[in-house]
């Protein structure tokens, strides 16, 4: 069974793809985004996968790749095109190379034109291909910088991507309209830039007259991506909160386990966002909590100290996760959710005192 997830970064409209072998649990990640690296690492851990390769389809101009940071967080070898000009990768790829993950693999197809180092990754059974910016859904990547070449891109897409089986699903690196997937057959029929009726001179003329502004992050993203996303301050990029042992969750919050909260209770504010009756109920409460029901938290956030870490608590960890969002919007920084809430505290942690408010 193939494990497959399509992830999204809303700031850059970038898709990141996770593929894993369901039997061996080995996995690869395609086109990660730096700001989403902890999210991706959390998902890999949640799915009990072992990351063996981190792949970029090209040197991106609109976001910084998460390759370097993911290698630090989750392991795996960084790989991208030998023609990309990037340094710091573990493997440099060329046309026809294979990236194995367990019993599955991706075959590399060189598809230059958007940049000189663009690659498309084709799944072993040719049921899926990951096209980067070479072919977008009903469109294509631009060709006006980073060694772009419209004529080369036309032949790359026609000869290396649209030559795949008609039912092969195509997954781009970006989409700005909310579409997630297309197919070879659809793009042959309906792509206005590269469909079957379009000839190379049509495409070259079209691309020469797009008049697009350069990506906002161009001056930051390209130099960083030529280092595979390695930042100037490596220690700051990998640092986790130091006030307690925390785990970053796929939902985007730091979590603390019951035993860790017990060890650090003197240094934190424990915020219980359940209703008053629940605090006197069978699950009890943690001694010394600050009780503010979730519905009142926005209005009463000023009762909390921004200078001390806050651990949010509820019955199961759901409402308290929302409390983290509310407090983050209010300017609080050191925040964590009690994993599993009072249910797990009762089963794994110290006995709650069970008293009323």
Image (cartoon, rainbow, N blue to C red):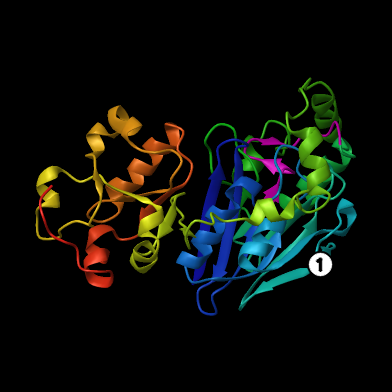
Which picture quadrant has residue 299? top left
Q: Is residue 183 left or right of residue 121?
A: left
Q: Which residues are magenta?
A: 130-145
Measuring from the top left, give residue 248's x and y in whole percent.
Answer: 49, 57
User: How many C-alpha atoms fall within 10 Å of the one at disc 1: few (<14), some, or many (≥20)?
Assistant: some
Q: Report the front residue among 96 and 66.
A: 66
Q: Is residue 241 left or right of residue 201?
A: left
Measuring from the top left, give residue 51's x and y in whole percent.
Answer: 61, 69
Q: Report the front residue among 239 and 129.
A: 239
Disc 1 secondary structure class: strand
Q: Residue at x 35, y 37 (%)?
A: 304
Q: Is residue 131 magenta?
A: yes
Q: Report the front residue among 210 and 8.
A: 8
Q: Residue at x 81, y 34 (%)?
A: 219
Measuring from the top left, give residue 272's x and y in whole percent.
Answer: 25, 48
| Residue 9 in sight from this viewpoint | yes
Q: Which residue is mark 1?
A: 91
Question: Which residue of the protein is positioned furthest toward the front in this rendering?
Answer: 266
Q: Is residue 346 magenta?
A: no
């Amino acid at each position: 069974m193939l494990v497959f997830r399509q992830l999204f970064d809303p700031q850059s409209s970038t898709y990141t793809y996770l593929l894993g072998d369901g039997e061996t649990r080995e996995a690869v990640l395609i086109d990660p985004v730096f700001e989403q690296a902890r999210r991706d690492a959390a998902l890999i851990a949640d799915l009990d996968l072992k990351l063996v390769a981190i792949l970029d389809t090209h040197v991106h101009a609109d976001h910084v790749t998460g390759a370097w940071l993911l290698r630090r967080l989750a392991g795996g070898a960084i790989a991208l095109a030998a023609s990309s000009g990037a340094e710091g990768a573990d493997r440099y790829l060329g046309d026809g190379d294979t990236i194995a993950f367990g019993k599955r693999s991706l075959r590399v197809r060189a598809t230059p034109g958007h940049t000189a180092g663009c690659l498309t990754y084709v799944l072993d059974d040719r049921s899926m291909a990951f096209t980067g910016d070479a072919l977008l859904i009903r469109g294509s990547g631009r060709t006006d910088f980073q060694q772009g070449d419209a004529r080369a891109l036309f032949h790359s897409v026609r000869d290396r991507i649209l030559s795949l089986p008609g039912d092969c699903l195509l997954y781009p690196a970006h989409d700005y309209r909310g579409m997630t997937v297309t197919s070879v057959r659809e793009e042959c029929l309906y792509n206005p830039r590269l469909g079957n009726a379009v000839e190379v001179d049509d495409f070259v003329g079209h691309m020469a007259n797009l008049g697009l502004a350069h990506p906002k992050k161009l001056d930051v993203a390209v130099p960083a991506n030529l280092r595979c996303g390695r930042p100037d301050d490596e220690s700051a990029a990998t640092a986790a909160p130091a006030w307690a042992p925390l785990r970053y969750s796929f939902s985007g919050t730091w979590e603390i386990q019951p035993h860790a909260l017990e060890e650090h209770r003197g240094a934190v504010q424990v915020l219980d966002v359940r209703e008053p009756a629940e605090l006197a109920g069978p699950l009890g409460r943690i001694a010394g909590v600050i009780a503010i029901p979730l519905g009142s938290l926005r209005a009463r956030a000023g009762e909390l100290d921004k200078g001390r870490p806050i651990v949010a608590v509820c019955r199961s960890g759901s409402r308290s996760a929302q409390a983290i969002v509310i407090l983050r919007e209010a300017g609080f920084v050191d925040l964590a959710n009690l994993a599993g809430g009072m249910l797990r505290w009762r089963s794994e942690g110290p006995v709650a005192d069970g008293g009323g408010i």
